[in-house]
Amino acid sequence: MKFLNWGTLLGLMIALLVPVRGATGDERIKGFTGPGSREERRAEAALMKLADPKVYEEHLRFLTKEPHIAGTKRNYELALYVRDKFKEFGLEDVELVEYQVLLSYPGDISVEMVEPVVYKATLREEGYPVDKDTSNSSVSIGFNAYSASGEVTAPLVYAHGGNPEDYDRLLEMGIDIKGKIALVRYSEPYSYRGFKALTAQRRGAAGLLIYSDPKEDGYVRGKVFPDGPWGPESHIQRGGIPFDFIVPGDPLTPGWASVPGARRLKPEESEILPKIMAVPLSYKDARPLLENLAGPAVPPEWQGGLPFAYHVGPGPAKVHLKVEMDNPVGSIWNVVGKIKGREEPEKWVVIGNHRDAWVYGAVDPSSGTSTMLGLAQNLGQLVKDGYRPKRSIVLCSWDAEEYTLTGSTEWAEQYADKLKKAGVAYINVDSAASGPHFEAVAMPSLGDFMLQITREVPDPATGRTIYEAMKQHRQGRNQKEEAGLIETRVGSGSDHTAFLNFVCMPVIGMAFDGPYGVYHSQYDDFYWMSHFGDPQFRYHATMATLWGVTTLRLANAQIYPFDYEAYAGEIGAYVKEIAGRGDKSIAPDLDFLTGRIKHFQEDARKLNRHIERLLSQGSPVSTEILQAINAALMQAERDFGSPGGIPKRPWFKHLIYACKFTYDPEVLPGLTEAVEEKAWPRAKEQIALLAKAVDRADRTLEEVLTKAPL
Ligand SMILES: [Zn+2]
């Protein structure tokens, strides 16, 4: 169970007290006065009426016609497509933004078992006549971007998920991975493949093969493509393996933008490029390798879905692995367009989605791209009809997300100073729709704000609200309701990362999930989407509504709906978790930190009450007071940042959130890592830094409370 989230619990309690309201409800919108709420809902209703599912289908068909990996001609053509559509829809300041970054493509790659029998892995996915896209000769072989190049012949060992505890278990069985090739599976438990590469490299493995076991995403789960949504035997999960949990973006320009003339590291100076060779395999190609492993039987939880007993090896299977990568510095293109705000054009609500895909990427990311195009069209139509949001909306189509979150990171690095002043929030949609289950992640300050939106947008399948559909789905999975409908611990793995961790802006991410076994394979294509993922494109349309409403509310709010009382409550809970794991020697420091957080929470509560009074009173509020409060609400999130960042990862400036090396969220990262490493003096330093950050945010709120009395 996820950690109990007080903000969400409060939201649920409120939800139980008031009847669910539809889009025409008269409940005040967070951050709006009564009249402001009515005006806002009129704009939202106009936006919702425009959402025609046909539009998303047409965009998706175009976006998924050909493979479009970052840095290729086709992905450039799609950049032009997005640019031209943005212009046609009436967006302003539309431009292509080019960066030159280190990319990585497959050259000559082969995986061949040479003993006890010869088997050469195909590294290819099979075609099916019902779907001509699966027989396109321009689809790449399976590869892991930024794999090292080289050649080795070594005995094979099966190492389950390739996580540190798996190699420890092997050592207990008397097997050292050093000098051997590790065969590991994806996603059990989920860890980012770059972490598997780093772990294998640290343990001295000679190479890494990562395969998709049918137990995770194949026939064990259900019908496989083209009869169902799960992965067929030859599907391959491609993907990057850079260590971008240390610093994302172009590996040669860590922390600064890859603009023309920028200083560049040599590849060997980068700390995020792997030194190990890695290749992804289908279960069709992995099967003969697994069948030729002897040695001890695997622990029961390591047994996968193939119909024989797995053994760990080493050998007799011996594998000849050869990898030649082609790693050029090449151009990538973001597309950026704006809808300028009528009152505060210098304040930006930034929304984004990446455009590059490993193959066709119907779900990842083209469902998000087609949704953003539909939303751009709808927002553009509102503008053509004479409407304009109060603040500017900046729409971004990112390139090379699949590499190192590259396009968004370079842009955020280039415009960091501007974004610190202008950036109200960043709202990311990567994969918009692979099924009917809504998932959202947001800062704790925006948890209730998001819940309110889910209570107003209808779920296309049931006609009830998204909120009701989420609750029902959680109950079906035996999760407690209060386990947090909105996830408020933010990790990495998509384009929100630079905005949260480098710029310290509040972020939100949204997706509709479902059975999806073809991630990063060629079967994530238009056929898959139109048969399994979202055949009627209703969830694309609904995502455009959710994304649009979220964006408009942030762009139009009289007072930003950032709830620091809930945020403080969560930070306090994180400290409590750490106190349970820490040494006695840091207990007084943690008590001190808890005291500072309580003080901050008290001031945040006062400010919340003050804002409630301002927004619920009948008379208009002066612009000066609104601006002072909004400036403070924006500043408080920045106050959680520290210019020096967290130990060993200075690019990660935010002191409350970072990602683990697996991409999972890590709260109070500097402190958590010090405690994990039992580095008590460093833990004390980190506690002091956190207390200072909380005090900064507290002072920001205090000052506005004294400046803007009722
Ligand atoms: Zn993606």
Image (cartoon, helix red, strand yellow):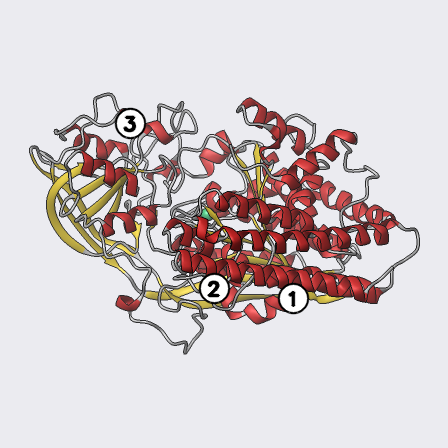
Residue type at numbered disc 2: Gly
Which secondary structure, mark 2?
Answer: loop
Residue 416 against residue 684 in the figure, above or below: below
The residue that label 1 is drawn on is 422
Would residue 483 be visible to someone looking at this image? yes
Contact check, label 2 and label 3, Cβ < 8 Å: no
Residue drawn at x 60%, y 66% as measured from the top left: 419
Contact check, label 3 and label 1, Cβ < 8 Å: no
The residue that label 3 is drawn on is 304
Image location (x, y in percent) of residue 557: 76, 54
Image location (x, y in percent) of residue 408: 49, 60
Image location (x, y in percent) of residue 324: 20, 55
Q: Residues within 10 Å of mark 1 (few under 14, many from 20)?
A: many
Residue type at numbered disc 3: Gly
Residue drawn at x 90%, y 57% as measured from the top left: 620
The residue that label 2 is drawn on is 645
Residue type at numbered disc 1: Ala
Mark sitting earlier along the chain (3/1): 3
Q: 486 and 174: which one is in front? A: 174
Mark sitting earlier along the chain (1/2): 1
Image location (x, y in percent) of residue 512: 55, 37
Left or right: where 100 falls relative to 643: left
Contact check, label 1 and label 2, Cβ < 8 Å: no
